[in-house]
Amino acid sequence: MAQVRAIRLCQVDNALRQEGDIFDYNGPENGNLEYLDGKPVKAQEETETEGDAPAEASGKKWTPKAKRASAE
C-alpha cells in the first residue's frame, strides 16, 4: 500500500478526501493524489490479479422460438 496525500478535494475509496489528507491507498494511479511512500498500482496488474480470464463462449448459437398461432 502506498501512503498518499490528496492534492485537492476528491473522492477516493468511497470517502471524500480533503486537500492535505494523508491516507493509505491501494489502487490505480490517480492524478488527485501525491504519492509519499510507495508507487501506484498499474491498471494492468490490477486486472490480472482480479481473477482468471473469462470463459470462452460455447459454439452454440441462439435460435428463436417458433411463432405462436394467434388466438383470435
Image (cartoon, grey):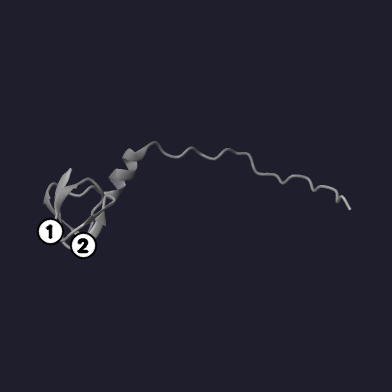
Question: Which residue does the image show at 26% across and 50% down from the upper left?
Answer: 28
Secondary structure under tag 1 reads loop
Q: Which mark is residue 9?
A: 2
Q: Which mark is residue 20?
A: 1
How far apart in space, not on screen, are marks 1 and 2 (Cα)? 9 Å
The N terminus, quarter of image: top left
Q: Position of residue 61 (x, y in %)?
A: 64, 43
Most extreme residue toward the bottom is: 8
Question: Which residue does the image show at 18% across and 63% down from the upper left?
Answer: 8
Q: Position of residue 24 (x, y in %)?
A: 17, 46
Give the vertical position of 28 relative to 48 (above or below).
below
Which quarter of the picture shows residue 54?
top left
For badge 1, the amino acid type reads Gly
Secondary structure under tag 2 reads loop
- In the displayed structure image, the side of residue 25 where residue 55 appears, left or right: right
- In the displayed structure image, the side of residue 36 where residue 16 appears, left or right: right
For badge 2, the amino acid type reads Leu
Between 39 and 10, the one lying in front of the other is 10
Most extreme residue toward the right is: 72
Q: Position of residue 59 (x, y in %)?
A: 60, 39
